[in-house]
């Protein structure tokens, strides 16, 4: 999980909404209301499947699908979040569907009634839905038994610290191996440095003519790729992140966030 603190919370829309990867263990032969083993068991079935059947089914669930969202989710239906229905033992007359995309499925192990795999998914995709659909494809039902996020793009679990390590550390947080300065966030974005008048204008939410001219290539890229191009603006004197802006298709440059970091 990526933890954003202070001014870094302004990056939440860009960091928390990226692709994710998970290590998941799916228990087969069980259906629950929450699609994981913390929920109420609705049905149990015997599992008499070949390993090859289970692996083939898992590998086939890659691509883009229109699947129902889990009942225990924050997706809204008629102005209420789905989990609000669930907590009152209610079921909406219609379960919303959502486009979900999964790829990179790698089977790690298979037991008589369980499978462990690693896979990636896009924003808005539910691993619980993937596990449930796997169970339905095999005709026995399925629910998540163990789930661990390994990547929250572009950050990986191998670079993380546990809460216990944070609590036990005697070092300043900015010396922790998992600490990432705001200026180093969004590593795939173009970075420009400014000084003097340009820096003052950025602080006031304005883009100077000179800076706009320096960003002509990004504006052309946005047009050619028919997509938004993000740019980080840093102070030449301090190296701090001053702002993030976007070159938008047919809309020029727009400042998205301004940062007050000393």
Image: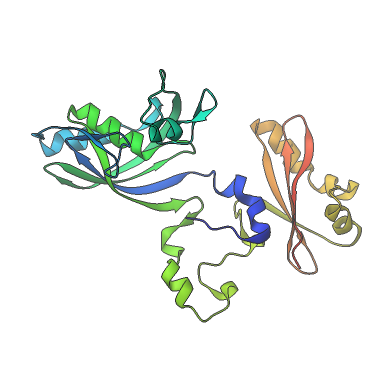
The colour style of the image is rainbow
Q: Position of residue 201 (x, y in %)?
A: 88, 53
Q: Report the side of 208 relative to 141 (left or right).
A: right
Q: In the rendered view, does 58 fall on the left or right side of 233?
A: left
Percent coordinates x, y for residue 183 in the rendering: 67, 61
Q: What residue lies at 29% left-to-right and 37% top-to-bottom?
A: 131
Looking at the image, can residue 70 be seen? no
114 relative to 94, above or below: below
Q: Name the residue rendered at 46%, 38% in the picture.
A: 122
Residue 226 coordinates in the image, percent (x, y): 66, 30
Give the image location of residue 158, x and y in percent.
41, 63
On the question of residue 51 being in view, the answer is yes
Q: Splitting the image into 4 quarters, where does residue 236 fall?
A: bottom right
Q: Left or right: where does residue 3 sit relative to residue 150?
A: right
Question: How many callouts does the rendering have?
Answer: 0
Instruction: Determine the residue located farthest toward the front in the rendered image.
Output: 88
Q: Quadrant of the C terminus?
A: bottom right
Q: Most extreme residue toward the top, as rendered?
A: 93
Q: What residue is at 68 percent from the left and 45 percent from the top?
A: 230
Q: In this picture, is 140 found above or below 151?
A: above
- Residue nearest the observer in this picture, 94 or 48: 94
Q: Quadrant of residue 227?
A: top right
Residue name at image x 41 percent, y 22 percent: 92
Up/down of 100 relative to 119, above or below: above
């Amino acid at each position: 999980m990526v933890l954003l603190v202070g001014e870094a919370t302004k990056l939440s829309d860009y960091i928390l909404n990226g692709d994710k990867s998970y290590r998941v263990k799916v228990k087969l032969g069980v259906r629950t209301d929450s699609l994981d083993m913390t929920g109420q068991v609705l049905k149990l079935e015997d599992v008499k499947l070949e390993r090859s059947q289970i692996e083939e089914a898992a590998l086939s669930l890659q691509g883009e699908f229109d699947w129902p969202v889990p009942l225990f989710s924050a997706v809204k239906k008629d102005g209420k979040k789905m989990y609000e229905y669930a907590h009152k033992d209610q079921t909406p007359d219609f379960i919303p569907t959502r486009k979900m995309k999964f790829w990179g499925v790698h089977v790690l192990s298979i037991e008589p009634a369980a499978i462990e795999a690693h896979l990636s998914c896009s924003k808005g995709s539910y691993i619980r839905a993937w596990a449930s659909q796997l169970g339905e494809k095999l005709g026995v039902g399925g629910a998540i038994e163990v789930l661990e996020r390994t990547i929250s793009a572009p950050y990986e679990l191998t670079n993380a610290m546990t809460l216990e390590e944070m609590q036990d550390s005697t070092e300043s947080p900015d010396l922790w191996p998992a600490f990432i300065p705001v200026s180093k966030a969004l590593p795939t974005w173009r970075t420009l440095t400014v000084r003097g008048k340009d820096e003052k204008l950025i602080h006031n939410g304005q883009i100077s003519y000179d800076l706009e001219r320096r960003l002509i290539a990004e504006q052309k890229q946005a047009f050619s790729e028919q997509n938004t191009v993000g740019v980080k603006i840093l102070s030449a004197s301090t190296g701090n992140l001053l702002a993030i802006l976007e070159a938008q298709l047919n809309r020029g440059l727009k400042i998205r966030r301004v940062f007050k970091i000393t």
